[in-house]
Image (cartoon, rainbow, N blue to C red):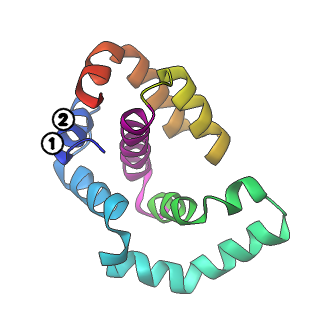
Amino acid sequence: MPKWEIHDKWAQKKGLSQEVSNYVNQLSDFPEQSHEFIQFCEHEGVEIVLQLVTAHDFKLIMNIPKYLQVEFMRRKGSGFVTAWYLHYVLDYIKMAPALTLEDVISRTRGKFGTCQELEAINDFVLDHAEEILHDCR
């Protein structure tokens, strides 16, 4: 994964606060250390997982830990969701050097569906493609 400094750099360029970036970095990489996230999973996570199982949404079932993080971020606000998707996409770019940026975004949509925040990250990443690739690969 890219260092947090890279995540912070791109979050700042996207107009996200350092506070939001720090929170998302910590949650994304160390979810087990977030008491607030653990409480969310214990109280609301069970219902979310049951809905996924009942709906037979196997694509999302395979991504339950990350899906729970996105749902948790939604409760904190759009800026947190945007920062989470940015973090996820930058990690994905680093982990899958053979994929194009378009492929990374497409696969992210395939895992989580589309939303306003992910589309904003799509546009942002493509607008800064050369520098992001340099930083992440």
Q: Quadrant of residue 128?
A: top left
Which residue is depicted at the point 45% across and 34% down? 96
Does the image show residue 16? yes
Q: Position of residue 20 (x, y in %)?
A: 26, 53
Which residue is depicted at the point 48% across and 79% down? 40
Q: Position of residue 126 (x, y in %)?
A: 43, 17
Q: Secondary structure at mark 2?
A: helix
Q: Residues within 10 Å of mark 2 (few under 14, many from 20)?
A: some
**Residue 59 versus residue 44 in the image, above or below:** above
The magenta stretch spans which residues? 75-96
Q: Residues within 10 Å of mark 1 (few under 14, many from 20)?
A: few
**Residue 75 versus residue 81 in the image, above or below:** below
Q: Quadrant of residue 9?
A: top left
- Residue closest to the eye, 58 or 42: 58
In magenta segment, residue 89: yes
Q: Secondary structure at mark 1?
A: helix
Residue assigned mark 1: 5
Q: Position of residue 70 (x, y in %)?
A: 51, 57
Q: Are marks 2 and 1 in contact (CB under 8 Å)?
A: yes
Q: Amino acid at mark 2?
A: Lys
- Residue closest to the eye, 2 or 55: 2
Residue 9 is marked as 2
3D distance between C-alphas at marks 2 and 1: 6 Å
Residue 60 left/right relative to 82: right
